[in-house]
Amino acid sequence: MTEKVEEYAAGLAKLAGAEGELNRVADELYQLGKTVESSDELRTTLSDRAIPASRRIGVLEDLLGATASPTTINLVSMLVGAGRGSQIGPISDDLLRQAAATRGQAVAEVRSAVALNDDQRDRLRSALSSATGMNIDVVVVVDPDILGGVVAQVGDTVFDGSVRTRLEKMKERLS
């Protein structure tokens, strides 16, 4: 299945690149993919072939919103039509990685309890670049379970600066 995910991501990258929208499409699909991954009901709906493809596409279009690129909407429609709607999460992850690689960057998925402003993203990008020795593209996922601070993942490396982890470490030291 991983090969298929990579093949679909590579195909989407070529199509979005040909439209001059690779970065925008990668970002929009990534956010959509995280939404799909967070809902078992949504994944089930997207993989249910008893539901007409037009309805499944409509659900995703609603999630993307009115500001989504027409290219993104067309590519999502293609994925649903090919029976890959429930795999949008893994496909979008790989597409984002491929888009970053074309810019000579690695992707850092950063989980934060709140959205980060541009200054915070820039400081985080700089710190992660220094720590990894790589040019980093920061993608922020708002995750209320973090409580505070951030958890960043670059490839297999995790940098955990969350309040939850700090509290757990403090609790261990006090025990």
Image (cartoon, rainbow, N blue to C red):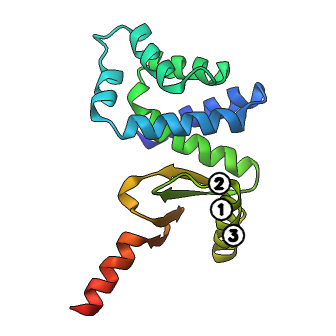
Label 1, residues with CA under 10 Å away: few <14, some 14-19, many ≥20? few
Disc 3 target residue = 129
Disc 2 target residue = 117
- Measured as percent of width and height from the top left, residue 13 is found at 66, 34
Residue 120 is labelled as: 1
Report whether residue 156 is seen: no
SS for callout 3: helix
Examine the image and state in which quarter residue 16 appears: top right
**Type of residue at label 1?**
Gln
**Type of residue at label 3?**
Ser
Q: Residue at x 53, y 22 (%)?
A: 76
Q: Residue at x 49, y 65 (%)?
A: 150
Report whether residue 86 is seen: yes
- Tell me how far mark 2 sits from mark 3, CA to CA: 18 Å
Examine the image and state in which quarter residue 12 appears: top right
Q: Nearer the viewer, residue 148 or 28?
A: 148
Examine the image and state in which quarter residue 9 appears: top right
